[in-house]
Image (cartoon, grey):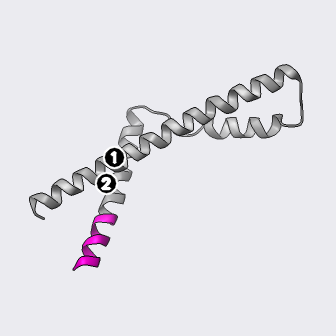
Amino acid sequence: MSTIEILLFAILVALFILVFYLMNIWGDNNYWQYRSRLEKLKKLKEDNNIPHLEKMTYLFERSLKVSGGTFIKALALSLIFSSLFFYIIKYIYS
């Protein structure tokens, strides 16, 4: 591998890590939106939509949290996806 290929691979890894963190931020934002809707409906005592909001709140609550372990997961996944993407592109152009 040449220096340019290594640099491009590192950039690709960084982009996949960025995408992973943005997905975490999106999931956290959705969690708080569903949680606020659920709390409002519980105060109003409207039962028609509460089970759905509880399910969605639980889904986003147990999703990925941003921590040190998240960075390790993001790094591992980005290395895997970057390697696959890199070798597919290399195979296409060779």
Place of residue 92 in the rendered image (x, y in percent of width and height, measured from the top left): 29, 78
Label 1: few (<14), some or many (≥20) within 10 Å? Answer: some
Amino acid carrying mark 2 in the image:
Leu
Residue 25, percent from left and from top? 49, 36
- Quarter of the picture containing the N terminus is bottom left
Give SS at disc 2. helix
Q: In which quarter of the image is the C terminus?
A: bottom left
User: Looking at the picture, does residue 31 appear above or below residue 43?
Assistant: below
Relative image position of residue 29 (x, y in whole percent): 57, 33
Residue sitting at 74 percent across and 40 percent down?
55
Dividing the picture into quadrants, the one containing residue 18 is: top left
* Image point (34%, 58%), residue name: 80
C-beta proximity under 8 Å, tags 1 and 2: yes
> Depth check: 72 or 52 in front?
52
Secondary-structure class at tag 1: helix
Tell me: 26 left or right of 16: right
Q: Which amino acid does label 1 sit on?
A: Leu
> What residue sits 25% from the left and 51% below the top?
11
Residue 27 x/y as whole percent: 56, 39
Residue at the limit of the structure toward the top, as seen here: 43
Decide whether the magenta segment is chiefly helix, strand or loop. helix
Is 88 positioned to the left or the right of 39 in the image? left
The numbered dot on residue 65 is none
Residue occupying image coordinates x 28% and y 69%: 87
Q: Mark 2 points at which residue?
A: 79
Q: Magenta residues?
A: 84-94
Q: Does the magenta stretch include residue 87?
A: yes
| Residue linked to disc 1 | 75
Badge count: 2
- Tell me: residue 9, above or below residue 50: below
